[in-house]
Image: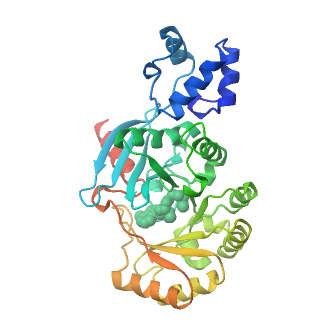
Amino acid sequence: MSLDILSMTLEELTAEFEEMKIPKFRAKQVYEWLHKHLAANYDEMTNLPKALRTELNEKLPIYGCKIAKKQVSQLDKTVKYLFSLHDGDYVESVVMKYKYGYTICVSSQVGCKMGCAFCASTLGGFKRCLLPGEILSQLYCAQRDIGERISHIVLMGMGEPLDNFDNVMRFISLITDEKGLNISMRNISLSTCGVVPKIKELLDRRLQLTLSISLHAPNDELRSRIMPINRSYHVDELLSVCRKYAAETSRRISFEYAMLSGVNDSDECAYELASKLKGMLCHVNLIPVNEVAESPFKPSSPQQVERFVEILSKKGINATVRRKLGSDIDASCGQLRLKENKVRNKGG
Ligand code: SAH
């Protein structure tokens, strides 16, 4: 067996059951238990014979997440989960409540290889890619826990989704499956630090999802300093594929820009950014950087953030400052895992 059960399509599960000499209708039952009723284990699948549940448990283990820690923000009810995986690793997810419903920010890898200077996920080191089912399971566990439908997904947790391309694509097709939770493609955002060849592959699929680009700097000199990926794919190359993406999908690109005091928040940076994005169907999200204990960056002052927005707006670039949610609970990527690993390392 090459795939775990939570990562299989109904067709694949049916073929697997056929080989195991299990009646076909059982595949549909199990698939619905997993992806519609969000069962976390076979014992919850009460309309399956006990012997079959035992057999499945042995032969097709469910590699789901378990809640290891949960923090609820006193400020805005944002919920941060630390999930443990079947092999003892940890990933993080955050659930946020907006006017239009619940959004979950999921992780795609344990840690990250990309090395962005301001990001906690990188500090924790790269461990492995997540299976499609492990990405699904973050949403399933959280939805079970809060007891409300989660309607929007952002792939903005730990990891670089385009560095786990096939598994992320399979996750997207399972989560939008009408036989499962049937989440609308338009309610999914995928965020990347700018892996250009993979953005091209994504474009070839013509999905109606929102592409977010973590830009954080308007030129190569600055961007290469804080984001090593820029040494492989330069700003102009990245922006040119973004222009193509927006033009061919008619979907607005969202640019993330973390404001680092004295680094990328000058008026010159704002003017340079505006000139590079001119005419593109896009939006800029400014985020005062979340301070990470191990990193030297400080958030820009609210006044400087305001100036930056004003310059962009004056130059015709749509920009907003992202509301900061869950700042009392370490709700930015990698922070909790980092703490958990430190505690574990101290303990043993
Ligand atoms: N690897 C993907 C997705 C994960 S990071 C990417 O790079 O887009 C999600 C977003 O949080 C990215 O825009 C990332 O640059 C940003 N981010 C990381 N650390 C941050 C911090 N300390 N403060 C603010 N934003 C941060």
Tell me where residue 331 sits by quadrant. Answer: bottom left
**Quadrant position of the N terminus in the picture:** top right
The outermost residue toward the top is 51
- Residue 29: horizontal and vertical position, in percent? 56, 23
Q: In the depicted view, which residue is nearer to us: 36 or 135?
A: 36
- Residue 111: horizontal and vertical position, in percent? 49, 49
Q: In the depicted view, which residue is nearer to us: 221 or 255?
A: 255
Residue located at (56% from left, 69% from top): 254
Q: In the depicted view, which residue is nearer to us: 198 or 250?
A: 250
Residue located at (51% from left, 18% from top): 57
Q: Is residue 60 above or below residue 306?
A: above
Res. 146 in view:
yes
- Residue 54: horizontal and vertical position, in percent? 49, 12
- Please give the count of numbered marks on the rendered protein: 0
Which of the colour schemes (rainbow, by chain, secondary structure, one colour) is used? rainbow
The outermost residue toward the left is 74
Q: Is residue 245 above or below residue 337?
A: below
Q: Is residue 202 left or right of residue 92?
A: right
Q: Is residue 97 above or below residue 316?
A: above
Tell me where residue 173 sits by quadrant. Answer: top right
**Quadrant position of the C terminus in the picture:** top left
Tell me where residue 179 sits by quadrant. Answer: top right
Residue located at (44% from left, 35% from top): 65
Residue located at (60% from left, 53% from top): 185
Q: Is residue 308 left or right of residue 187?
A: left
- Residue 304: horizontal and vertical position, in percent? 39, 85
Res. 188 in view:
no
Q: Is residue 291 above or below residue 305?
A: above
